[in-house]
């Protein structure tokens, strides 16, 4: 059996579990609200960011990483479209645990980062089915993807991109220890993501913390532009 078939099988139970969390179900069944969705997305934003940084610095993982796999800017855009930002929510302890684990892997077990990359890229297969019901539950205008680009971006290429990543990982001349580390990375990452998804609130009445809002936000109904605001600050 190929390495990536083994990895896929190894996370299969965890995948069923994450699909059944209230957060996943709410994206599919029309009960997800904007703030709850944005809270979850803001946690994923920091996870993607730490993985992107760790992979960039990794000799083992960086050759498999392509520009289309960078998701941080897309998530920032989505949060913006939803009228929020990554500063709107505090990081949950479960997110911090994942980020700490990624950082440790970046130092001691870089092949595990490839397991995480596979999980996040593989999750884009799920995005192909999530996008439509999510757009509806968030009340987006027909045809609009503003706020759900995390699920729609590069969608047409997703099956090919995921297949190619898996083929490249299968064809790499990894030794057994590296293969084990990759598989363990995917399994542990899925377990930690499940722990996060399990605590993501759905149907909460809690508003985003004002104290956590972007310090550069100028508030009001006008959407703020981080890049402009930050560069204005720099040139001030
Ligand atoms: C509403 C939630 C979800 C749904 C409906 C969903 C659905 C799907 C579907 C339809 C596939 C393709 C199955 C196939 O090719 O046989 C898939 C694959 C996959 N999903 Fe999910 N998914 C969800 C959440 C997640 C999450 C949260 C993750 C992890 C962050 C994830 C990771 C994966 C992975 C790694 C694959 C395997 C890709 C492959 O090896 O081809 N999924 N999912």
Image (cartoon, helix red, strand yellow):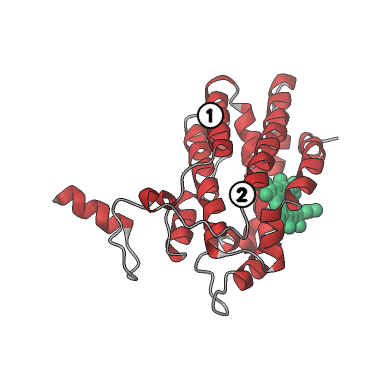
Earlier-in-chain disc, 2 versus 1: 1
Give the foreground label among 2 and 1: 2
As displayed, is residue 201 above or below residue 31?
above
Please give left or right for residue 5 compared with residue 205 in the image: right
Q: Nearer the viewer, residue 209 or 144?
A: 209
Q: Nearer the viewer, residue 82 or 113?
A: 82
What is the x, y in percent for residue 19?
74, 52
Please give left or right for residue 35 compared with residue 118 in the image: left
Q: CA distance from mark 2 to mark 1?
A: 19 Å
Please give left or right for residue 50 compared with residue 199 in the image: left
What is the x, y in percent for residue 234?
19, 48
Residue for point 53% across, 53% down: 39
* Snapshot quadrant of residue 80: bottom left
Residue for point 71% across, 21% down: 175
Q: Nearer the viewer, residue 146 or 174?
A: 146
Q: Residue furthest front?
A: 205
| Residue 222, numbered circle | none
* Snapshot quadrant of residue 66: top right
Which residue is label 2 attached to? 200
Residue for point 54% across, 69% down: 145
* Secondary element at tag 1: helix
* Snapshot quadrant of residue 189: top right
* Secondary element at tag 2: loop
Q: Quadrant of the N terminus?
A: top right
What is the x, y in percent for residue 95?
55, 39
Which residue is label 1 attached to? 100
Q: Is residue 41 visible?
A: yes
What is the x, y in percent for residue 42?
50, 50
Residue for point 47% across, 36% down: 53
Within 10 Å of the Cα at label 1, are there few (<14), some (14-19), or many (20+) other Cα atoms? Answer: some
Within 10 Å of the Cα at label 2, are there few (<14), some (14-19), or many (20+) other Cα atoms? Answer: many
């Amino acid at each position: 059996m190929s390495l990536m078939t083994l990895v896929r099988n190894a996370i299969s139970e965890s995948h069923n579990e994450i699909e059944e969390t209230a957060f996943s179900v709410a994206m599919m069944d029309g009960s997800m609200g904007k703030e709850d969705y944005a809270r979850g997305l803001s946690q994923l934003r920091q996870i993607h960011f730490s993985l992107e940084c760790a992979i960039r610095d990794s000799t083992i993982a960086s050759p498999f990483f392509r520009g289309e796999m960078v998701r941080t800017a897309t998530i920032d855009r989505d949060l913006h479209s939803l009228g929020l930002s990554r500063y709107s929510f505090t990081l949950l302890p479960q997110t911090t645990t994942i980020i700490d684990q990624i950082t440790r892997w970046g130092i001691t077990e870089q092949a595990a980062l490839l397991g995480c990359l596979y999980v996040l890229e593989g999750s884009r297969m799920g995005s192909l089915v999530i996008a439509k019901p999510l757009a509806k539950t968030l009340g987006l205008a027909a045809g609009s993807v503003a706020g759900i680009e995390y699920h729609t971006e590069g969608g047409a290429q997703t099956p090919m991109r995921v297949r190619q990543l898996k083929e490249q990982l299968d064809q790499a001349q990894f030794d057994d220890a590296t293969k084990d580390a990759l598989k363990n990375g995917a399994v542990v990452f899925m377990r930690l993501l499940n722990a996060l998804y399990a605590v993501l609130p759905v149907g909460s009445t809690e508003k985003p913390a004002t104290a956590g809002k972007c310090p550069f936000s100028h508030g009001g109904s006008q959407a703020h532009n981080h890049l402009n605001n930050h560069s204005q600050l720099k040139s001030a």
